[in-house]
Every structure is written in structure tokens, then in C-alpha cells.
Image (tube, rainbow, N blue to C red):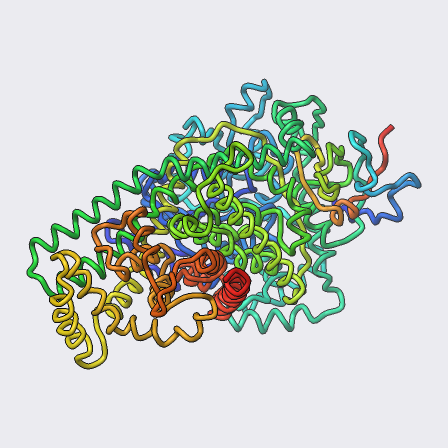
Amino acid sequence: MPAAPSRGLTSSNTLPPRKSGPTTTNLALVGNPNCGKSTLFNVLTGLRQRTGNFPGVTVERKTGTAVFGNHLVELVDLPGTYSLHPSSLDERVVLDDLLGFYPTGAPDAIVYVADANKLDKHLLLLTQVMDLGIPVLLALNFVDELQKSGEALDFNDLSKSLGVTVVGISARTGEGIKQLREQVGILLTDKSLPKQNFYAFSADEKQMSEHLATSMPRYAPYARLLVAHHGDDPLVPAGIRIARAAAIDVPEFDTMRWQVRETMQRFDRFLPTLRAARKTDDTETVSDKIDRIVTHPVAGPVIFISVLFVVFQAIFTWSSWPTEMIETLFALLGDGVREVLPEGYVADFLVDGILAGLGGIVVFVPQIAILFFLLTLLEEAGYMARAVYLFDRLMQRFGLNGRSLVALTSSGACAIPAIMSTRTISNPKERLITILVSPLISCSARIPVYAILIGFAVPSITVWGIFNAQALAFMGIYFISILAALVSALVFKYVLKSTEQSYLMIELPQYRIPVWRNVFINVWTKTKAFVFGAGKIIIGISMVLWFLASFGPGDSMANAETNAAKAQQTLQLSEEAAADYVANSRLEASYAGRIGKAIEPVIEPLGYDWKIGIALVTSFAAREVFVGTIATLYAIGSADENEALITERLSEARRPDGTRVYTMATAVSLILFYLFAMQCMSTLAVTKRETGTWKWPIVQTVYMTGLAYLAAFTAYQLLS
Amino acid sequence: METELPKPQDSCAAIEISALELVKREKGIVCGFADDCFARKYLSMGILPGSQVELVRKAPVGQTCYFKIDGRSLAVRKKEAACLLLHRVD
């Protein structure tokens, strides 16, 4: 049987051979959702794994290295799918990978993972995979549960009737993993192909497949048929695409009917080989009992909101001390560098440019890690699918999907992981809207900004006996941000066009105790991806900002410094205050200061002066920079970013006419601006990556910042 | 061995209903699909003519349905549920 071009053994291979071995063998893990595939992947690879993207699309590609027998293997964990006929981006990449349309080529062998308790459902995809002309091994997962329920399954029988090697495993307990490694090693050595074409083609299908034989000579007949169905994709080589377009231009070709008939025939063929097939068990399981409460129309939403509350509480309380430690550490590092290096631009660049940027990323690690930890726990336990079920209809009204809820929830910590989590949304329009509105949900970076400004907007008094007015204001801010996200989504729902129909069919998996290994590996790899992915951009921007704040046109900086030196002598300031005064004058003369002054006319109606203008400019990299910039601008001394001190200084700030800058009106206006404005380079970078074009990050910036301006303008004009 | 997918009109008896019309805790047996595209999706999840469908409950706003099909829990939207054609049981 002709095989698809292999990754490791043919000349078409584009992967350079690994140095440690003669060739790298590529192995793909394939299976239905909830078959325990990722748990097995984690068992086999441990921390030797990387996440990237499939080329051209944004579906996460998890790869890792593992040893099977005497083979060093590059293992790829393909997204879970029910069938090789795809209906979402996730499922599409499975087909493209197995057909070898990515530069990495087709896998040399496939380990098919199936839930031993659900063979009547999980074998459909296996029979499709077997027809691709690639060696396959069947790993039956959850055999420990099979034994518990007292069911017997004859692996030899199954192996004989299917024509593939069968190994029983439990990825959770580690049972059978050793045997699996041995058997995969044997498969990789003798490369035996599944014996038969499982699916019997109709005459029309046979003709279709033969039609494509000349353009796809090395592919199995079923692979050709799949291309006939789904070959209208830019990834498919042009020659094949042209041949396909000609081949399907016949009246007999009815892709949906053919797919339905194929699926039916496959079931008809394998179901009789399963003795216990199609048993219908009416007894109520533990999961059903939990669901009676968790998916209850009234109790369900209440539980969900409580869960969210606990998650946020945890993010804020657990992350406070590691965050402080990181801040202290970076301050110490900066001091150390300044002590070792002579004063000057090199030291300034290292401390204020690079270290400040690095600190700006690492400081988010505790929050992001805790968020991922808790979300993974909920996902692993099976809770997230229930939340999707409960809120799908509500989300749909706003042009979103039940799955958008996961993204919007994550946005409360950081929009970056949130946008990354939209990949499971199959409808492109719903996915895009989720990406566009996620950054409106107030993320953790806005908290320090709110913390300082609320002091000006709301007095710290007790209302209604028990509530602190400032805490209520905080809640109000979050409420407004959620409302803004939903209303914006609604607007996009009517503005954006969509041809694809939206659907939701989600399996509600059994509740399970999370596998700790999965949780920790997930937290580790996701956090690493954030630090290195977004980190590069944040450091770059941080260096640019440092340059803008440290240099000015011509000798304006030097002049400002001399003038300030003279002025501070007449003012008779203390040494520290004098240094701050000079720094302040320098900033005013710098490029950043000039930008601040240049935009002053635009932001004046919002109640801001040029100093706030600078803070807005620097905040464009990341919102939390506001606090640091304000501290520098109002000569508080960069070492001392103490909130109480900043508040005190800000209240003393005056306009040229002697009125206070920070009134209630300015503070409310600023809060609203930070609430809505797109001021996060990293989010824009992720949006670009996820949507594949700069169009959407630009749309995001324009609509969010426009909204921010409008809200801040209205608030200031009404309140002042 | 080859089986054509039963067309709703010829295999479903007169008491045919869509899964959307089930009341809570009512059961039905799948006899066909009203739409080819959703048929493919149901089939690939192993929901075939002959599968037993039970409506467990509906989500708060009454649109998303929680079914138990052949012992497996599945949430689908109203539109998808309407495509699942059933015989009533009992």
C-alpha cells in the first residue's frame, strides 16, 4: 500500500536529523476528546516538551521527546477529534498533520488512544486512521476502571479483528506504560501496516480516488478520498489542489452524503466485533449526581459565580507575597548593577531599560501561574464543560460561544492567556469576537492604577453599615468592564459578517480527580510560553521607552539639566529633592516629555495635563507602568513607589492656575480611560498571532481607545 | 454490509419527534437526522440510529439541552437538538 511521505525516512523530509541519533522518528498521538491522550503524552515525555503552533494556524502544537525501545522519538500530541472529517480548526490540523501537509511531513507511526470503556464510540476514528497507510498501535486507556467495573475485554480478540497491536494502559496510574513503550519500539522497527482497507469504497469513491492517484501517487486511497472532501485548503500543495478541483467537479460528488455514508459503514463494520457494544446503562453515576447540583438551572450559575470569586480571591491573595519578593529582588539587582558599573548610560540602560522590562514580565508570573493552576484544575476535573453548557445561550445572545466564558474568565487575570484559550471555539466569528472583547475585562495590571486613583474618586467611608465605599467602587469597576465587553461583543455580532454556521456539541466528561502531573506540566509550559513569548515584546518596548525618556532632541536635555541645577540652588532643596527635581526637568525635555506636551490639547478635555500625557504614552507598553511614570514625574524618587506617598504627592499637584490636578473628576476620568483603553503591547502581539493579521489588533486599539476617550471625556465634563 | 443512512421519512414511524420535544427525563431512540451537516457530527460522536437519548435537563435560559445518549453526557444547542429525530420510548 502506498504510504504518505514520511517525516523521517524520505528525501522530502525537511526536519534536520537529530544529532544524538541516526534519524528522528516522528510519532503522533491521536484520539477522541477526553480519551486521556494528554495524560499519556505527559507520562511519556515529562518536561521534555515544547509548545508551538502548527504553521499558518494558531492551534497549539505540543511536541516532546521520548524513547521507545531503541528509538528516539519526536512525539506530537494532536488535538482530540471524533473524526478525520473536520469541523473546527482544531480538527483540521489533525487531518493536515496526518496527511503530511505540514513541513514536518506525515508521522512515521501513530499511537491511537481510546477509552477502553467507550470503545463503541472511540473506534470510529481508529478505523479512519488505519486506512491512511501509516503503522498504527491501539492503546486502550482507563483499563483500571474496566477492571473495577468487572468488565472483561479480550485484547487478543480485538487485536485480531482489527489487525493492529493492542496494549491496555492506564495513563493515570502508569499501568501498562512499560509494555506500551516496548510495543511501540517493535512497531517502529518492523513498520507493519494495518492489514486491510477497513472502509469499502463505493464505485464513485473508487473512481474519485483513482482520479487523484496521479497527483498523489504515494498516498493511500483513503487519504486521497479525504483530500477530495477537504482539500480546499492553502496548505494542500497547489498541484494536488488543482487536480482535486477537477476531480470533484462531477454530479455524483455529494460531500456530506458521502461522509455520512462512510461513517455509517465504519460503525456497521466494527460494532459487531465488540461484544459489549451499545450497552445502555440507566443507573445514575456519581457524575450524574454531582451534575444534578452543578448543572441545576438555579444552583449551577450560583456555584459558577462562587467558583469565579474563589479563583480571583486566590489570585490576589496567593500572589501578593511572591510578587513583592520579585519586586524586591529586581530592585536589589538594579542596585547591584549600579554599584558595579560606573554611572552613565550603560548602567541606566541595563537598569531602567532591560531590568525594568524583565521585572515587568516576571512580576506577572505568580498571578498567571496561579490562574493557570486553578483553571487547569477545573478543566481536568471536568467542570469547565459544565460552565460552557450553563452559559452558552447567554453568551450566544452577545455573539459569543459558551466556550468564550473560559476566555473572559481568564481575562480577569491577563488577556494574553485568555486570547490563547479561544482556540477551542470552532466558529471563526465567535472566536474573533471573543478575542476582540477579552482585553476589556479588567486585568490584574490595571489594579495598581485603580488602587491609586480610587483614593481621589471615592472617600474611604463605610456605607450601608458594612461596606467600604472604595471596595464597592472596585467592584463597580469590574462590573462596568464586564458590561463593556458584552455590549462591544453585541456590536461586533451585528457588524461582522459570517458565513459559517455556529454550533455547539460538547461532551460533558465524567468528573475525575485531577492528575497532578498534568496540572503542573500545564502550568509550567503555559507560564514558560508567556515569559518567552510576550517577554520579548515587553522588553523591546521597555527599551524604546527608556530611550524616549532618556534622550531629547539636540542638546535640550543638557540645557534642561543646567537650568534645573541653577534653579534648585535658588530653591534650596535637600539633596534628594534636588536630584528628583533635575530628573523631572530632564523628563520634561525628553522625547517622551515632548510627546506628552504634543498630545496635551487632545487630552485636556479629559482633564489631563502633559504629565499625565507622558504616563498615558508610557502606559501603552503596559498599564502598570503608569504608577512608575507618575512616581518619576511627580518627583517622588524612583526607589520609593509607595502608594500612600504617591497619593499624597498627587494631591499636592497643581495646574498653572493653582487648581488641583487630581480632583474627583480627573480621577474618575482616568479610571474610565484605563478601564477601556487598549494599552498593552503584549495583548496586541498575541491578537496578531492568533488572527494572523494586523487588521484585528488595529481594530482593537481603535475601538477600545475610542471608547476610553469618549467615556473619560463624558465623565470629566459632567463631573468638573 | 453497506447500510444507507435511513432517511427520516422512510424509517421513522408516525410517532417521530425531534429531541427538542422531549420533556425532562423522557427517552427516545434515534431514528434519523433532519440535516446532513449535523448528521455527520452526531455520527462521528457515535450517535447512531438506535442510540438511546434521554433529556436530563435544560440550561437556565432553556435553550441548551443536556442529553444522556448511550450513557454519555452531551450538551447541544436547541438548533442541533431539533435535527435529532427520535421514536418515543413507552
In front of the other: A471 or A150: A471
Determine the image quadrant of residue A544.
bottom left
In this rendering, the count of numbered labels is 0
At x 57% / y 55%, what residue is drawn? A485
Where A291 sits versus A373, above or below? above
Q: Give how far across and how far down residue A453 sits, in percent.
A: 41, 52
Residue A453 as seen in the image, left or right of residue A330: right
At x 50% / y 54%, what residue is drawn? A98
Where A525 sits versus A666, above or below? above
At x 81% / y 31%, what residue is drawn? B26
Q: Give how far across and how far down residue A491 sits, in percent.
A: 64, 62
Observer able to see residue A61: no
Where A140 sits versus A609, above or below? above
At x 70% / y 28%, what residue is drawn? A279
In front of the other: A609 or A587: A609
Residue A353 as seen in the image, left or right of residue A511: left
Q: Give how far across and how far down residue B45 sits, in percent.
A: 65, 43
In front of the other: A287 or A188: A287
Observer able to see residue A145: yes
Residue B7 as seen in the image, left or right of residue A627: right
In front of the other: A492 or B51: A492
Q: Give how far across and how far down residue A512 sits, in percent.
A: 52, 28
Q: Find the residue positioned furthest to the front.
A: A658
